[in-house]
Image (cartoon, rainbow, N blue to C red):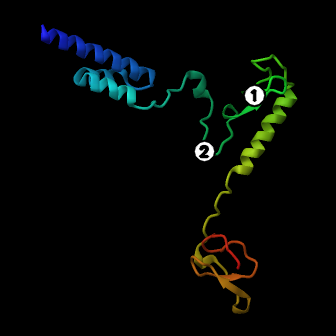
């Protein structure tokens, strides 16, 4: 009798763990085994674990993956001028009030957001030059030395030519 109850409990937690794991894009079979072996503790672990990586659908596989720093319009919203609700940046009609945006207006809004994103992106660091390729300034033109690498600097230089660190003139 007790063995039957324990077996039913183990199978129940295995099924529940598998369902929870499947909803979180995790392997339901693996989490089902964990639920079967550890019962309530396996189920709690399945609930507590975070979301897994989403699998790409066939429509997503055709699009290029968004790399770091690339503009993704799905990550941005705009405010409808009629109802003040937020809608997707690429939307041509507000889903709340039905306000229509012209194609040119939508393209302009996308370009504006692209420019704002590009302005916020930090500039790509320049490659450090090989010290043998650098021209050392003549002694009469040396105004200071870099605080990091002690390379001689001309007055007015904003970056050290050797280590590319920004120069702070005091």
First in sequence: mark 2 or mark 1? 2
Which of the 4 image quadrants contains residue 8?
top left
Determine whether 69 is above or below 33 in the image: below
- Circle 1 sits in a helix, a strand or a loop, which is it? loop
Most extreme residue toward the bottom is 140
Q: Is residue 61 visible?
A: yes
Q: Identify the residue position indicated by label 1 in the image.
A: 90
- Between circles 2 and 1, the one closer to the viewer is 1
Which of the 4 image quadrants contains residue 145?
bottom right
Quadrant into which the C terminus falls? bottom right
Most extreme residue toward the top is 1
Q: Identify the residue position indicated by label 2 in the image.
A: 68
Residue 26 drawn at (x, y percent): 41, 26
Residue 38 drawn at (x, y percent): 24, 25
The residue nearer to you, when weighing 131 against 48, is 48
Residue 129 drawn at (x, y percent): 61, 71
Alpha-carbon span between mark 2 and mark 1: 21 Å
Q: Residue at x 73, y 26 (%)?
A: 87
């Amino acid at each position: 009798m007790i063995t039957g109850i324990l077996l039913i409990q183990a199978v129940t937690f295995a099924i529940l763990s598998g369902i929870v794991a499947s909803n979180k894009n995790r392997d339901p079979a693996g989490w089902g085994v964990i639920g079967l072996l550890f019962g309530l503790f396996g189920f709690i672990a399945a609930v507590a674990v975070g979301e897994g990586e989403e699998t790409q659908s066939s429509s997503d596989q055709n699009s290029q993956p968004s790399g770091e720093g690339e503009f993704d319009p799905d990550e941005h919203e705009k405010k409808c001028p009629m109802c003040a609700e937020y809608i997707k940046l690429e939307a041509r009609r507000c889903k709340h009030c039905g306000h229509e945006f012209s194609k040119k207006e939508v393209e302009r809004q996308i370009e504006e957001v692209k420019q704002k994103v590009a302005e916020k992106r930090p500039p790509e660091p320049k490659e450090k030059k090989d010290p043998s390729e650098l021209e050392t300034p003549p002694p009469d033109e040396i105004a200071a030395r870099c605080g990091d690498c002690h390379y001689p600097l001309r007055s007015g230089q904003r970056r050290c030519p050797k280590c590319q660190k920004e120069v702070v003139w005091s």
